[in-house]
Amino acid sequence: MAAQANTSYNNQPRERAYVAPKQVPIGEPGSGAPITQTVELNIIETESGQMLFEPDAIHIEKGSVVRFVIKNSGALEHEFFLGSFEEIAEHQKRMRDHPDTPHSGTNTVAILSGETAELDWKFSSKTNMEFVCLIPGHREAGMWGVIIVHDHLAPKLKD
Ligand SMILES: [Cu+2]
């Protein structure tokens, strides 16, 4: 990875997108900026033991300030964590080793059973990323999805 120590992440070939350098710029907190897109997510737990975000793929236009409205329809507590693919892999490993590590930060929100939580995020760079629940076992049960950031959103993908 040393050869990629420059900052030209966005110029990297497309096939490298998932093995990006450590600090991938995934955006920044919404911080009161006007919301340009609202994405509603629902968390469900199935009888067969799956835990799922619905939908599990979200299309966003670069520059959007998105309000995620996440409803927890399950019986357990869950969380919504936004991060690069690499960051999430690291966090997941840390959570496995230290399950009681609380998450805090502007890119994560916990949602109690039956409740709805919101997270605002500005997608300032065209970087695909992942959203996930990092509670041990939950990602393995299906609690993850992808966010695809486009330069321009095709009309069919808009609300
Ligand atoms: Cu969960």
Image (spheres, rainbow, N blue to C red):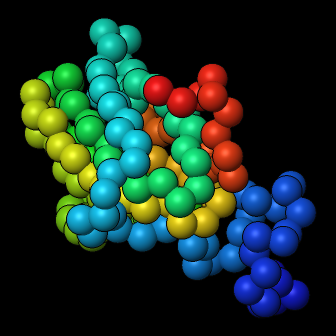
Q: Is residue 137 visible to the viewer in this orientation of the structure?
A: no
* Quadrant containing the N terminus in the rendered view: bottom right
80, above or below 30, in the image: above
Q: Quadrant of residue 125?
A: bottom right
Q: Is residue 10 visible to the viewer in this orientation of the structure?
A: yes
Image point 30% across, 22% down: which residue? 44
Give how far across and how far down residue 110 sits, in percent. 20, 50
- Which residue is more in the foreground, 17 or 123? 123
Whether residue 111 sits left or right of residue 2 in the image: it is: left
Whether residue 124 sits left or right of residue 17 in the image: it is: left
Give how far across and how far down residue 152 sits, in percent. 67, 46
Whether residue 60 sits left or right of residue 2 in the image: it is: left
- Which residue is more in the foreground, 148 or 99? 148
Image point 85% across, 56% down: which residue? 14
Count all numbered tags in the image, as a single digit: 0
38, above or below 34, in the image: above
Image point 31% across, 57% down: which residue? 34
Q: What residue occupies the far top of the structure in this picture?
A: 47
Give how far across and how far down residue 76 sits, in percent. 17, 32
- Which residue is more in the foreground, 58 or 144? 58
Give how far across and how far down residue 107 sits, in percent. 34, 63
